[in-house]
Structure formats: structure tokens, C-alpha cells
Image: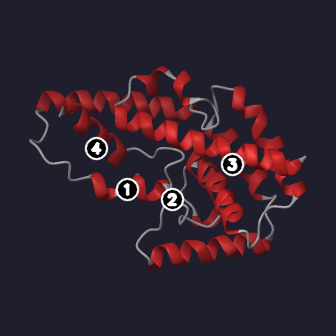
Amino acid sequence: MQKKWLAVVIAATMIIPACVSAQSGGGRPGGMRNNPKSRLSSLIRNIGELEKARKTPLSKDQAKKIVAGVTPWQKKPRMTETEAKGLYMKLNAVLTTKQKNELDKMAAQNRRFGGGSGSGGRSGGGRGGSGGTPPTPAQMAEMRQRMQKMQSFFKTYNPFYPPGKYKEVSQAPDRMKQGFTRRYASQQALLAQLAKKAR
């Protein structure tokens, strides 16, 4: 029960990069959350949505630029907020106005149908009511300590680095570890797809 409450409280109070839903701005800086890593992770997922929809997919040149921008970061365990912002701006600039408009349409449609799908739906409020007895004061104190550690971790966390190599992730509740692993795998699949297109 304690791990379940830890997962619920952490997920409810932390902004976890790569957990922001695709509806949070459609790839445009002005419409997204302020956390640079959240915006960056959302942008990568949005690019995946463009590829799936096939209406305005990336061109060979665009795919090449996205892969070239991300590849150096796949071996770096640390990424600052400033670096995340810079990479976001670089990758976002690759998209055309037509593609960004298409993402805006997708975001609007997702909002009309109750929040859309994908990781945004999985990370949201549906899990808030886990049932059971509320945590004790001692458990709450442990949760706060864990959240402080995670806040420090996210300051240098790199969403493109294998999550299994982070001690903080390996020590997180199972649900949280699974979320990191799932999102990383999805991201890597997209990058492999773009690398193939870029050849």
C-alpha cells in the first residue's frame, strides 16, 4: 500500500518529462507547459503522431535533422533545463507551419473527446483514487523526502538516456519505472523509424 501511495503522490505533484499529453500545445512553444523537458518530450511524441496520421509526415530531410539533433543526447546522462529548451527550439524549427497546424487540430480534437490517448491519458487522474487507507504522517514524511530527491533528479534528467541506467528510476515504485520504460521504448521506436526514413 505504501508504494501505491508513493506512486500516486509523486505522479500527482511532479512534472515528469515525457508525461505531458500531446494535447498540450500541438508542438508550439506558446501553448505548452513551462517545463522545457516536458515540452521536449511532448514534441517528440507529437512528431510520432504526425508519422502515424500520415497526413503531414516528416520529409526525409526533416527526419534526418530530428535524428541528428537527438542522437548526441542518447549517450549523455545529464541534460539541464537550458539545454532542453535549446534542443526543443532546434527540433521544433524543423516542423513546417502546416505540420504545426495539424498538431493543433489533433490537440483540439483530443480535448473534445476527453483528453485523447497515449501517455497523457495513462499518466492522468484516472489513478488518483487508489483506495485504501490514507498514508500516516511518517509515510507522508517519506513521500516528501522522495519527492525532493526526484525534483533534484529531474533537474538533470535526460529523457533520451536509458531510464534503467538511473539509480533514481530503479528505486522508484514499479508503476513509475514501467512508465519510464514504456515511454523510452516508444521514443526509441520512433527515432529508429525516422533514422530509416532519413537514409
Residue 81 x %, y %: 61, 40
Q: Which residue is mark 1?
A: 124
Marks 3 and 4, Cα distance to the nearest angstrom?
29 Å
Q: Amino acid at mark 3?
A: Leu
**Element marked by disc 4:** helix
Q: Residue at x 50, y 54 (%)?
A: 20
Marks 1 and 2, Cα distance to the nearest angstrom?
9 Å
Give whichever of discs 4 and 1 has the lower sequence position.
4
Residue 21 numbered mark, or none:
2
Q: Amino acid at mark 1?
A: Gly
Query: In screen coordinates, is 122 left or right of 192?
Result: left
Residue 137 x %, y %: 12, 32
- Badges 1 and 2: C-beta atoms under 8 Å apart? yes
Give whichever of discs 3 and 4 has the lower sequence position.
4
Q: Which residue is mark 4?
A: 8
Q: Residue at x 51, y 41 (%)?
A: 182
Query: In screen coordinates, is 199 left or right of 101?
Result: right
